[in-house]
Image (tube, helix red, strand yellow):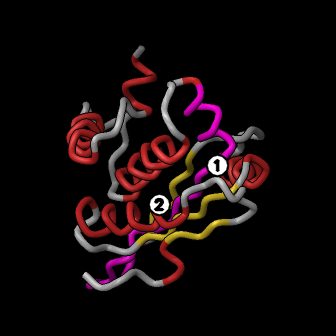
């Protein structure tokens, strides 16, 4: 696949320690391998913006780690999946809690969000998303994801 458009991964108010190049490469892998080449956009920003989005779109006035916004019905042939928003601040706290790097946690959240963009929903799909997430986490050598954590 060709290089992604510059908008594949957007950083807004993110500190210098966030590994931008590594995350861009991971976003390319997600697009090419998990999403079968379908485009998505991922915003990495802070708690404040995630709280605003969570309040606006889900009616929950609190920050969250990842939000997924699947594309509306697209004309046939349109490959766009939708958009993700990830809080680097939530990711940082969770990385500390689960004893791994910020980079690793951001990858866990991005994978989870892309699976939602693909139409999976761990609350209603009888384990389909959990199985897919486990398979991809193994492929990308990632630790337990959000679904496994919720079961603990």
Q: Nearer the viewer, residue 109 or 53?
A: 109
Do labels 2 and 1 touch, CB within 8 Å?
A: no
Confirm whether the magenta stretch covers residue 150: no
Q: Name the residue: 79% across, 50% down.
A: 48
Q: Tell me if 6 is positioned left or right of 123 in this view.
A: right
* CA separation in Å, label 2 and label 1: 14 Å
Q: Name the residue: 55% across, 63% down.
A: 20
Callout 1 crowding tier (Cα within 10 Å): few <14, some 14–19, many ≥20:
many
Label at residue 87: 1
Q: Tell me if 66 is positioned left or right of 147 in this view.
A: right
The percent coordinates of residue 49 (x first, y second) are 75, 55
Which image quadrant: the C terminus?
top left
Q: Nearer the viewer, residue 16 or 139?
A: 16
Which image quadrant: the N terminus?
bottom left
Task: Please tell me in which quadrant of the rendered image residue 62 appears.
Answer: top right
Label at residue 23: 2
Outermost residue toward the top in this view:
152
Task: Please tell me in which quadrant of the rendered image residue 81 appears.
Answer: bottom left
- Under tag 2, what secondary structure? helix
Q: Tell me if 13 is positioned left or right of 118 in this view.
A: right
Q: Nearer the viewer, residue 42 or 122?
A: 42
Label at residue 55: none
Above or below, 150 relative to 85 = above
Above or below, 67 relative to 43 = above
Q: Name the residue: 25% across, 36% down.
A: 134
The percent coordinates of residue 78 (x first, y second) are 33, 83
The part of the chain drawn in magenta is 73-96
Task: Please tell me in which quadrant of the rendered image residue 45 appears.
Answer: bottom right
Callout 2 crowding tier (Cα within 10 Å): few <14, some 14–19, many ≥20:
some
The percent coordinates of residue 123 (x first, y second) are 39, 33
Front of the two marks 2 and 1: 2
Q: Earlier in the sequence, mark 2 or mark 1?
A: 2
């Amino acid at each position: 696949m060709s290089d992604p458009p510059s908008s594949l991964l957007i950083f807004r108010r993110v500190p210098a320690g966030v590994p931008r190049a590594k995350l861009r490469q991971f976003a390319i892998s997600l697009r090419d391998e998990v999403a079968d080449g379908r485009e998505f956009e991922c915003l990495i920003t802070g708690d404040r913006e995630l709280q605003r989005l969570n309040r606006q779109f889900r009616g929950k006035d609190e920050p969250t780690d990842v939000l997924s916004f699947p594309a509306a019905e697209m004309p046939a042939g349109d490959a766009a999946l939708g958009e993700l928003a990830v809080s680097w601040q939530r990711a940082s706290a969770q990385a500390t809690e689960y004893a791994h790097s910020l980079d690793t946690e951001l990858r866990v959240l991005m994978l989870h969000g892309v699976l939602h963009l693909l139409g999976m929903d761990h609350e209603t799909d009888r384990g389909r998303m959990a199985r897919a997430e486990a398979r991809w986490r193994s492929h990308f050598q990632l630790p337990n994801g959000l679904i496994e954590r919720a079961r603990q």
